[in-house]
Each structure stands twice: as C-alpha cells, then as structure tokens.
Image (cartoon, helix red, strand yellow):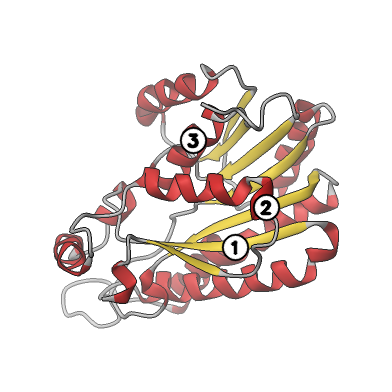
Amino acid sequence: MVKEFKNKNEWALILGGSSGLGLATAKKLARHGMNICIVHRNSRSQLKQINKDFKEIASNSVNFKSYNTDAFISKKRNELIENFEKVLDGGKVKTLVHSVAKGNLKPMVSDTMPILQKDDFELTIQTMGISLYDWVKAVFEAKLFSKDARVVSFTSEGNKKAWRNYAAVSAAKVTLEAITRNIALEFARFGIKANCIQAGVTDTASMRMIPGSDRIKEHSLQRNPFNRLTLPEDVADAVYLLSKDEAAWINGTIIPVDGGEHIN
C-alpha cells in the first residue's frame, strides 16, 4: 500500500471519529500514512471498543491523538486547539473532517410523542451545521492548516428529501452545505478546499436512530444500481481521494458517494 502522507508531518483532524464514517475515514487515512487526531464524545461504557479501534489506527506507525470532550463548547474547543498545537509540534492539518451526528429526531406532529420545538432546530443546526465553521475558523486562526488543506463534511439525501422525524437534521444538512460552499469561496486564497460528501444510506448507529430507518434502508436497496447499501469504507475512500494532491482542483461541491443511488 502506498503511504503517500508518511513523513510529511500532516494530520487529519476528525470531528466525530469514534464510529461510523469518521472512524472509517481515520482508519483509511492512517493506512496511507497520515497522522490522526480524533475529537469525540463518548461514555465510559463505550470506551472499550473505541480504544480497540484507536489502537488499530495507531498501529499504522502514525502519530495519533484523541480528545473525548464536547466539541461544541467554545471554551473546550479553544483549549483543545491550544493543546493540539503542541501535539502537532510544527505539523499542519491537511484534512479536517466534519462527521458530527448529534441531531434531534422528533416529529413535527404527534399525539403521543414530544414534537419539535424552536430550540431543537437551533441545537441541531448549530451542532451539525454551524460547528463546521466554528472549527474551520479556530484551526485557521491558530494557523494550523497546511498550505494545501482540505475540509470535508458529510451530508445526506435528507438535504432534498423529506423523511419523517428528520426535519431538524435536514435543516442542519442544508446549512452545512451552504457553509461549505462559502468556506470554499472565502478561504480559497489560503489554499483551503472545501467539499461535502453526500453519502448513500449507510447502516451506522446514527442511521439506526432514525425512526423508520429499516424502511429507508429497504427502499435504498431497491433504488441502488448495485443493490447494496453504502459502506463507511466507501465514504472513507472518497475522503482519501479528496485529500490527495491530485484533488487540489475540486472545491465547493457536493459529491454523491452512493453507487448511483441518487439517480434512481
């Protein structure tokens, strides 16, 4: 395997990297020699499996650092950035990955369940959308981005389609895409390229939390030209490709990674 990122002192900073798409991305980039920093928020009961996955990442002879903290509190984010700068020791962030799945899945109308409130929208849009800008801004102001950096975030077909109980997350995904386009425009002169990956339906823990997710997965299998769901590794492969030097001219776009599911 080619380790094109090895010995370049370049890092991937992955927000939400302890499971799902973020974890698969961390493993993929580490196998190609990129140093990895994961920011996650997990309970003590979840750490046994997480630490096992983190050891696998570090076994690729790369530098590895993780922070189990609330990435959305500005004070903690600033403290983390300050500490991470010391860990970098002159290195730079090549790829920042936003893989945050912390949204509200309440319905708009229900006789038996709590319904969406304004606060639910605001919290979901902040954590799953606006937080991308918060982190890009913090890393940029700390001068930690490389001269040819990438910002990659994950969106879904819920950006266009209406799924029950998905209204707040859908609003957050549209916000995320808008922010990504403006990062691509306004940070371009600093060498930063920003893109969204629109992953196909993927059987992750976050997906399984969506009410009716089994029906969504069944429908996706019928729509997909290859008759399978998207895997976290499919998305990780795309992040890897976007991180390569040859992807330097890809900027400000939403890239479907779904085997063609979106065309059907």
**How far is disc 3 from disc 1 in space, using C-alphas?**
18 Å
Which badge, 2 or 1, comes first in the chain's sequence?
A: 2
Between 220 and 100, the one lying in front of the other is 220
Say whether residue 108 is left or right of residue 91.
left
Q: Which amino acid type is shown beneath numbered disc 2?
A: Arg
Question: Do the residues under discs 2 and 1 have CB atoms within 8 angstroms?
Answer: yes
**How far is disc 2 from disc 1 in space, using C-alphas?**
8 Å
Which badge, 3 or 2, comes first in the chain's sequence?
A: 3
Q: Residues within 10 Å of mark 3 (few under 14, many from 20)?
A: many
Q: Quadrant of residue 199?
A: bottom left
> In x, y percent, where is residue 176?
56, 69
Q: Quadrant of the C terminus?
A: bottom left
> In x, y percent, where is residue 205?
30, 47
- Label 2's element? strand
**Tag on residue 150?**
2
Q: Which amino acid type is shown beneath numbered disc 1?
A: Asn
Q: Which residue is mark 3?
A: 28
Q: Which residue is mark 1?
A: 195
In the figure, 120 relative to 257: above or below?
A: below
> In x, y percent, where is residue 89?
82, 26
Tell me which residue sits at (71%, 43%) in the image: 94
Q: Quadrant of residue 220?
A: bottom left
**How far is disc 3 from disc 2 in space, using C-alphas?**
16 Å
In the figure, 236 relative to 68: above or below?
A: below
Q: Residues within 10 Å of mark 2 (few under 14, many from 20)?
A: many
Q: Quadrant of residue 7?
A: top right
Say whether residue 224 is left or right of residue 91.
left
